[in-house]
Image (cartoon, helix red, strand yellow):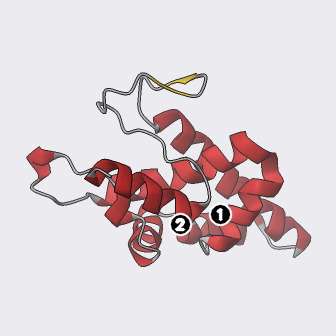
Amino acid sequence: MSNRQSKLAEASSKIGYEALQAAGSGVPTVGSRAVQEGNKPLAGLGDRILAMAIVDIAVDQNISIGETNARIQMHASNARLAFLCDDIGLTGCIERNVSQQGMVPQSIKSTTVEAVLGAAFKDGGMEAAHQVMQHLRLI
């Protein structure tokens, strides 16, 4: 098994979903989805799913709009998502860009977590996304 295959298998076991491709990976499709911009579209979706889940909880708890926005900023910040990516071991599954000397920037880590959430939503709807959010300690 190659290093890339090993990383994909590890990522799949950590998140319970097929690992997706980064921009520039050379992989043109995952299933029927074209991978033209890597995981950016899924990350955008995941970002919104996380915000929606936080708002949904806040509405149930009758929390003000200002406090709800503060919760979104705190729980969905790039710094927190990058920390969780490191903490669950998902960072070790990310293919490194040679030009970054083996480092994985915070933005890539946070985008990866958001893309995983977006992929879970596309695969199984809000129920699957909610399970992933709980598993990854996003909510």
In the picture of the structure, the residue carrying the numbered disc 2 is 14
Query: Residue 124 location, x and y as percent?
Result: 78, 46
Tag 2 secondary structure = helix
Which quarter of the figure has residue 60?
bottom right
- Camera-near label (2 vs 1) is 2
Sequence order check, earlier mark of 2 and 1: 2
Q: In the rendered view, would you say 56 is above or below 36?
A: below
Which quarter of the figure has residue 72?
bottom right
Is residue 77 left or right of 58 when viewed as pictured? left
Q: Residues within 10 Å of mark 2 (few under 14, many from 20)?
A: some
The three-letter amino acid code for the residue at tag 2 is Lys
Is residue 40 left or right of 70 when viewed as pictured? left
* Image mark for residue 69: 1
Q: In the rendered view, would you say 79 is above or below 29?
A: below
Q: In the rendered view, would you say 45 is above or below 131?
A: above
**Residue at 76% across / 55% down in the picture?**
128
Query: Residue 26 location, x and y as percent?
Result: 31, 26
Query: Residue 62 location, x and y as percent?
Result: 88, 73
* Image mark for residue 137: none
